[in-house]
Amino acid sequence: AFRPAELEGFGMTRPPNTVGGDFYDILPLRDGRVLLALGDVAGKGSPAALLMALLLAMMRTLVDEGLQGAELAKRLNAQIVKHAPGSRFITLFLATLNPATGEMRYVNAGQNPPLLRRAAGSYERLREGGMALGMFSEAAYKEGCTTMNPGDVIVMYSDGITEAEDGQGQPFDE
């Protein structure tokens, strides 16, 4: 079983401009679980960064109210539909990890599927969820569930990685 001291997290963003719309959050919850979030606001620069800041504020407020998983994604979607211009949408991966048991419940709303690397070397893609936030007000979301074991690693990334190019100008892709 996991113990909280055994969890390690690392995150990094490098926007192509001074600001961008990619974001991540690692949020300890009152009950000992940890919320992991990674997303990408369509577009670049200040408009994307402002919508990203709005989403993070709404997410933290709804999490404080006890929402999680599919219900959290549904409520965030409704707010983004209401407050964002029609051309804007947000891809988002949300997961709630229980360090005591390793149980991880997640929703993937149109985000690149994170890779769960098992200690033995195999990979699983975390796809369960629904469409990106902000596209349709009545979008439905489905929760996936998996168990992380000691030595497993979850790799979450945005299209900033897959669309970046190597020295020969070829996209890294997945």
Image (spheres, helix red, strand yellow):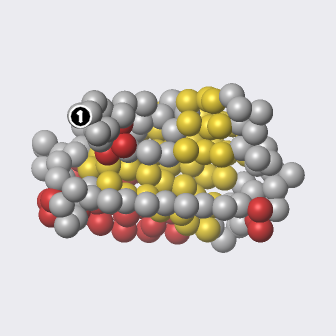
Kindly identify which residue carries mark 1: 169
- Which residue occupies 82% across, 62% down? 3
Residue placed most toward the observer, 136 or 97:
97
Q: Residue 157 at x, y = what percent?
A: 44, 45
Left or right, 126 with reference to 153: left
Question: Is residue 149 toward the left or the right of residue 80 in the image?
Answer: right
> Residue 93 location, x and y as percent?
46, 45
Q: Determine the residue positioned at 18% across, 61% down.
A: 17
The residue most toward the right is: 1
Q: Tell me the quadrant of the picture where the C terminus can be found.
A: top left
The answer, for residue 141, to whether it is visible in the render is: no
Residue 130 lies, in percent from the top left, at 42, 32
For the residue pair 172 and 123, the one nearer the viewer reads as 172
Query: Does residue 18 appear in this view?
Result: yes
Identify the image quadrant of residue 10.
Answer: bottom right
- Total marks shown come to 1
Measured from the top left, where is residue 6 in percent x and y? Answer: 77, 62
Where is 96 relative to 57, above or below? above
Q: Is mark 1 on a helix, strand or loop?
A: loop
Between 66 and 125, the residue placed more toward the observer is 125
